[in-house]
Amino acid sequence: MPFWSTPKTSLNQRLRLGLGTMLVPLLMLAAGAVISFEGALDSFRKHDNVGREALFPLAHVEGLLLDLNVVASPVEPSRSITWSEYQLKSQAIEASLARLLEFSHQDPHKFNSVQEIQRKWHRISQLCQQILDPSVAQSGKGLSEPARVELQEQLKMILQNVQQLNYRLIAFQNDANANHAEAVRKEVRQMIAMICGLALMLAVVFAYGLTRSITVPLQSLEDGVEKLGKGDLSHRISLAADAEFSHLAATFNLMATKLEQSQQDLYRLATLDGLTEVYNRREFNRWLRVEVEKSQRNTDQVSLIMVDIDHFKQLNDTYGHQAGDLALCEVAQLLQREVRPGDIVCRYGGEEFAVILPKTNHDDSVAIADRIRLAIAEEAIILPSLQQIEMTASLGVATFPGDAQTKEHLIKQADQALYGAKTSGRNRVHQAQQNVVENQVVV
């Protein structure tokens, strides 16, 4: 029996063994990379040191030559240079140029301008001696100023030569580094290819073994996820396998339960009014459209009752908004009690409610509306202070297709009937396109 299918080995142990085996080539790769990079860094350091051995004396020469500018064009007496100071600088320049000549003998192609720099330096040394040497300067007398002019030109030219040589040396050094980097990269590529091949073989072997022990329970989980994705939130996974997969199945089932509950909560939030727990305005429009379309197909009638609480603003102003909220909730509950099963109660907006009556003719809808009006008039609101508040409501009734030919026209007709009930004294039911006040009760 293969090692990965023995019952004594759990999935966790198999994964650890597989991952541990996969770490072997990674460690080999890391060790090889460290050795290669260390070798490359040592080689780069050697190249860099060789370059610096030439660049340091060259930079020293450039700095000393810049110091001699005060000899050619003295601006401030305090910055002038003495004969003894010049001799020290001259010795340092001679030593640095001698060092550069040694490099020139080793690689004439790189240091082909060192001899030219040395020739210019001999002339500069002569001019500085004419200017700074007391014995020569006194004997020459009038030669000091022409010597300074020539010294300026010579210093300018030699500094240009020094800078050109500096740029050339840096370019040669960069080329050498690039060539060496390319060679190192080829070596590292070969080593990585070998280690990756080994890692691939090990990965194939252990992946095959692990796959054999994981495929079946994963297929069950996949089927469950697919059903969940298609909207079957009631689906649950029953898996009798390793402890790891059993735990995963239990987690999936818990997630599905929470998603099912969340979907129900979202449906409530999207369809119900948050205060009164009846359908909201958007659901009212949807249900009315559905019922009107059914009426058109089946030649049935559908009626609409608009209900508006009388003097609601006055109730809010007198007793507070809490009392107003209680009144809205009481009316919503009363409407759900008084209507028939299948009738749809909605909050239309503010203190106005709408009741959709499927398959209901004009006379029946008026009777239902009058029953609602009487129930509201008999219902009292009990405040937290135990104070009782009486209220009434005005209602407008319209029926499709007798009073309107479209959903929008039906709403308009019911709303106009409601307005007629309001203007006629409130606490009454008005029918669409009629001015007869029915079932008037004064409370």
Image (cartoon, rainbow, N blue to C red):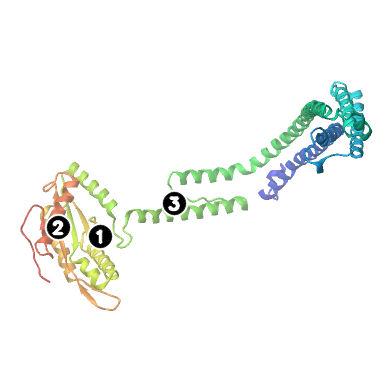
Left or right: where 342 falls relative to 145 = left
- Are the residues flagged by discs 3 and 1 in contact, CB closer than 8 Å? no
The image quarter containing residue 365 is bottom left
Farthest residue, direction left? 436
Kind of residue at disc 3: Ser
> 115 or 36, which lies in front?
115
Q: Position of residue 318 (x, y in %)?
A: 23, 72
Viewer-side label of 3, 1: 1
Viewer-side label of 2, 3: 2
Q: Which residue shows up at 11% across the image and 63% down it?
A: 428
Kind of residue at disc 2: Leu
Whether residue 419 is visible = yes
Kindly identify which residue carries mark 1. Answer: 350
Farthest residue, direction right? 135
Left or right: where 416 falls relative to 180 = left
Kindly identify which residue carries mark 2. Answer: 418
In this view, 83 is above or below 110:
below
Of mark 2 and mark 3, the one earlier in the sequence is 3
Q: Quadrant location of the C terminus? A: bottom left
